[in-house]
């Protein structure tokens, strides 16, 4: 399956980084369209004049999507949703959502599996959630958003052999500073180099993030980086997507090096508490996921979903 309309989407408040310059180069080289969603603090001149990209500035976003823009709010990494919707409206077949501190390797995007049915290594955990880092060479750390109630048993995983899977979500890993909970980062401060070479998956639900992930067009109306839920924004979005598209996610080798932007880890920890308290509850009751979202988030998701022409009985019932 040839994917003709390929988009890369990010949001940033920073000057162009090594990563954004590199993504712009790859986009030009390999036929992607690179979309940068600005915020109030973003130095727009540098993106409008120096970087080869489609720059959605903060002044035009409220005109493009007034209600959606309002429900997201400003100074928010969830402005990324504006880019997802924009790319979808432009006819994107696949959207890669990336972060501005994830430096792509030269072969980034070359091993694109979205839209294909591929052979994957299948893993089955003893519990009902799979930690995608549990079967790598870093089993001591866990993926951000994995339920903390299951941490002690997360490495009890059985290899089930090869399986064919239609890939709607391709979550590539990240060398360097991995995407883990603040608890793990505070206690271990890992720097990683993953040895994953082949795609793998699970028959159980699992978290993925928005920092180096490829999404098929058909899942975009069901996936959002949710505002007003702290650092569970993309994680809860990943679980909700899998409610609608089970067994659609494949993990793949690292294609970026994360040189992580400076962040306050205690603040990150505070922003993860909503997940520590509620992620496992949400996963075990996904049919009623709206019940676990704050009112502001519910309002956003309803507005976001209304931007797509959907005939979705499950959603209408909620």
Image (cartoon, helix red, strand yellow):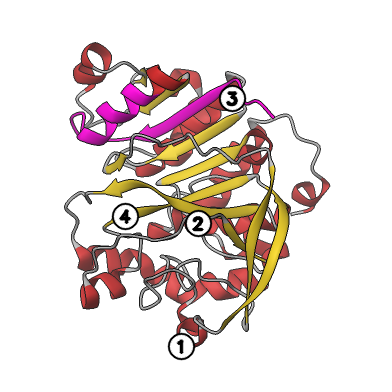
Disc 3 and disc 1 in contact, CB within 8 angstroms: no
Where disc 1 sits, the SS reads: helix
Measured Cα–Cα span from mark 2 to mark 4: 15 Å
| Span colored in magenta | 1-26
Q: Nearer the viewer, residue 255 or 304?
A: 255
User: Looking at the rendering, which quadrant does residue 13 occupy?
Assistant: top left
Which of pointers 1 and 4 indicates the residue nearer the eye? 4
**Which disc, if any, is residue 30?**
none
Q: Tell which circle, 2 or 1, labels the residue nearer the N-terminal end.
A: 1
Mark 4 — residue? 175
Measured Cα–Cα span from mark 1 to mark 4: 24 Å
Q: Tell which circle, 2 or 3, labels the residue nearer the N-terminal end.
A: 3
Mark 1 — residue? 152
Measured Cα–Cα span from mark 3 to mark 1: 41 Å
Mark 2 — residue? 208
- 263, above or below 301, in the image: below
Q: Tell which circle, 1 or 4, labels the residue nearer the N-terminal end.
A: 1
Where disc 2 sits, the SS reads: loop
- 16, above or below 77, in the image: above
Q: Tell which circle, 3 or 1, labels the residue nearer the N-terminal end.
A: 3
């Amino acid at each position: 399956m040839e994917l003709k309309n390929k988009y890369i989407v990010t949001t940033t408040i920073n000057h162009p980084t090594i990563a954004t310059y590199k993504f712009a180069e790859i986009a030009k080289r390999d036929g992607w369209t690179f979309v940068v969603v600005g915020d109030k603090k973003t130095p727009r001149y540098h993106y409008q004049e120096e970087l080869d990209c489609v720059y959605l500035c903060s002044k035009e976003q409220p005109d493009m999507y007034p209600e959606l823009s309002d429900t997201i709010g400003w100074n928010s990494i969830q402005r990324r949703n504006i880019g997802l919707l924009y790319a979808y409206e432009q006819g994107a077949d696949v959207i890669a959502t990336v972060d501005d501190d994830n430096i792509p390797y030269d072969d980034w995007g070359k091993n694109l599996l979205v839209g294909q049915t591929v052979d994957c290594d299948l893993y089955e955990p003893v519990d009902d959630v799979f930690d995608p880092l549990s079967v790598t060479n870093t089993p001591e750390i866990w993926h951000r958003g994995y339920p903390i109630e299951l941490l002690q048993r997360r490495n009890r995983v059985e290899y089930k052999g090869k399986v064919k899977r239609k890939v709607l979500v391709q979550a590539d890993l990240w060398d360097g500073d991995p995407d883990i909970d603040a608890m793990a980062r505070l206690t271990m401060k890992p720097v990683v180099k993953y040895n994953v070479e082949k795609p793998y998956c699970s028959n159980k639900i699992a978290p993925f993030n928005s920092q180096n992930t490829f999404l098929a067009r058909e899942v975009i109306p069901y996936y959002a980086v949710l505002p007003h839920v702290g650092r569970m924004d993309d994680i809860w979005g990943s679980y909700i997507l899998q409610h609608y598209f089970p067994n659609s996610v494949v993990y793949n080798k690292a294609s970026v090096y994360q040189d992580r932007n400076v962040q306050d880890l205690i603040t990150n920890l505070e922003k993860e508490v909503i997940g520590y308290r509620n992620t496992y509850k949400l996963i075990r009751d996904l049919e009623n996921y709206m019940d676990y979202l704050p009112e502001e988030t519910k309002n956003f998701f309803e507005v976001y979903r209304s931007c797509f022409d959907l005939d979705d009985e499950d959603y209408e019932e909620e």
